[in-house]
Amino acid sequence: MSAQGGEERVVVLDFGAQYNQLIARRVRECGVYSQILPYTTTAARLREMAPRGIILSGGPASVYDPGAPRCDHAIFDSVIPVLGICYGMQLMAMMLGGEVSPAERREYGKTTVHVVGHSALFHGLEGHLTCWMSHGDVVRTPPRAFDVVATSESMLTAAMADDARRLYGVQFHPEVVHTPWGMQIFRNFLFGICGCEGRWTMASFVGQAVEAIRAQTGGGRVICALSGGVDSAVAAVLVQRAVGDRLTCIFVDHGMLRQGEAEQVVSTFGEHFQMNLVHVQAAGRFLERLRGVTDPEEKRRIIGEEFIAVFEDEAAKIGEVEFLAQGTIYPDVIESGSETAARIKSHHNVGGLPQTMKLKLVEPLRTLFKDEVRALGEELGLPEEIVWRQPYPGPGLAVRILGEVTRERLETLRQADAIVLEEIRRAGLIRSIWQSFAVLAPLRSVGVMGDARTYGHLIVLRAVESEDAMTAHWVRLPYEVLERISSRISNEVAGVNRVVYDITSKPPATIEWE
């Protein structure tokens, strides 16, 4: 969605760093709409968009390497303020005549920077500041007209500024929590340098989204992929607000839902919200296509294709449907890969969509992070139990079963997963944990029950805390909670005799196992 009136937009040019989305998040937290675009975006295109500012992200390359990504040089000649972060600063320095070279001593982790000059970028900050560094190259000599306004402990350039042209660079990462005053850098850039006012809110987003949906769909009919999760729920309510009874929500029960989930979705959206809801029971159809499939990417691809096939079948019954609305959010897009970002895993609503699909996509949440979707849900008046449901993958339990998906394995995992959620709620942890669930591993282990030998299934417990699913830390669950979960699964779920706890953060792992 575009920024209100266009004047409050800031563009982040993506050079492939792992956490570029954090830059966009920090800008939005200041009340300014941000949009991530590839580094190949031309200066002419940026002038058309008329952003208040441009941020050059970090990236894994060295600016002096052959084929290293470069932005359009004319960006620095425009009147739009530019802030380069890490690789972005080094690129700015090199392209404007400065010198960049490998550092004798790389700087990784927490370090101290010393403010040595007067610049609007450091307004209101102290002279000695702890920050986060992660780089092996350094700016030896800034370009002409640039001043060094901060140095590192190694006396290297930590920040440079050309206040007259409003061009700035920082070697540290203000977007990460390890730079505790980093938000002040963004506020100084956005408000003191770019002249932003911070008027972007979820209330303004609703109006923009509704207008955009109406403009895209015209008078056409829309079907919405409704799973019952917060993303699809918010998307459905938003689209309904835009098109009214021209929306039909299709809930596909693919047989891989959590315990009691189908009944809850039908009750909530068909009865409470009184949406046009079609409940498609398609478990047999999906399981037949998944027979013998063990590769996780293949599972996602098959489920994505079958989803679209179901939607197109239902659309044909409804008649004259042109559009498919779905709750794609920004982390889905990032992890599915882009021009500058590697594919972590294909999300069925992004990487799994067939090229032959006839329906046109409506994705009003595609630029939002999960916490922003929750805020939007509250703005739209969705009940708390929907807004604060834990994130759930579109392919459902299929990507929490390692190996082949069968009815028997689904039932085993479904029962174990229900116990996990019950005990997390019982402990009062459901709002503080990002996701908590069970995984069925393709392993068996020896156990003993009732004085007899068993050879049972292995259940993996996963619980993480996160802000946006792009990074996550495993939760230090109380021992008594772990004990109750383990005891109940081992005693109540037939065929399971061992429960283990995954204590891996993201990175290096992902939240889901597949």
Image: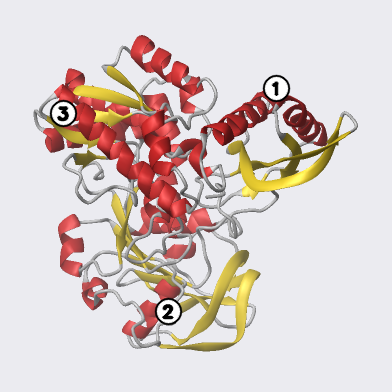
Chain-order first, disc 2 or disc 1: 2
Q: Residues within 10 Å of mark 2 (few under 14, many from 20)?
A: many
Q: Which residue is mark 2?
A: 90
State the mark number for residue 191.
none
264 with respect to 306 (left or right): right
Q: Secondary structure at mark 1?
A: helix
Amino acid type at image mark 3: Ala
Q: Which residue is mark 1?
A: 426
Image quadrant in which the N terminus is located: top left
Q: Nearer the viewer, mark 3 or mark 1?
A: 3
- Residue drawn at 58 percent across, 60 percent down: 179
Q: Nearer the viewer, mark 2 or mark 1?
A: 1
- Residue drawn at 24 percent across, 74 percent down: 72
> In this view, which residue lies farthest toward the top?
271
Amino acid type at image mark 2: Gln
Q: Which residue is mark 3?
A: 316
Distance Cα–Cα, label 2 vs label 3: 54 Å
Amino acid type at image mark 1: Arg
Distance Cα–Cα, label 2 vs label 1: 51 Å
Image height of 15 relative to 430, above or below = below
Q: Position of residue 190 (x, y in %)?
A: 37, 55
Q: Position of residue 281 (x, y in %)?
A: 37, 23
In the image shown, does 251 or 179 lie closer to the viewer? 251
Q: Secondary structure at mark 3?
A: helix
Q: Are marks 3 and 1 in contact (CB under 8 Å)?
A: no
Q: Nearer the viewer, mark 2 or mark 3?
A: 3
Q: Residues within 10 Å of mark 1 (few under 14, many from 20)?
A: few
Q: Position of residue 447 (x, y in %)?
A: 82, 40
In the image shown, does 479 or 417 lie closer to the viewer? 417
- Residue drawn at 23 percent across, 66 percent down: 41
Chain-order first, disc 3 or disc 1: 3
Chain-order first, disc 2 or disc 3: 2
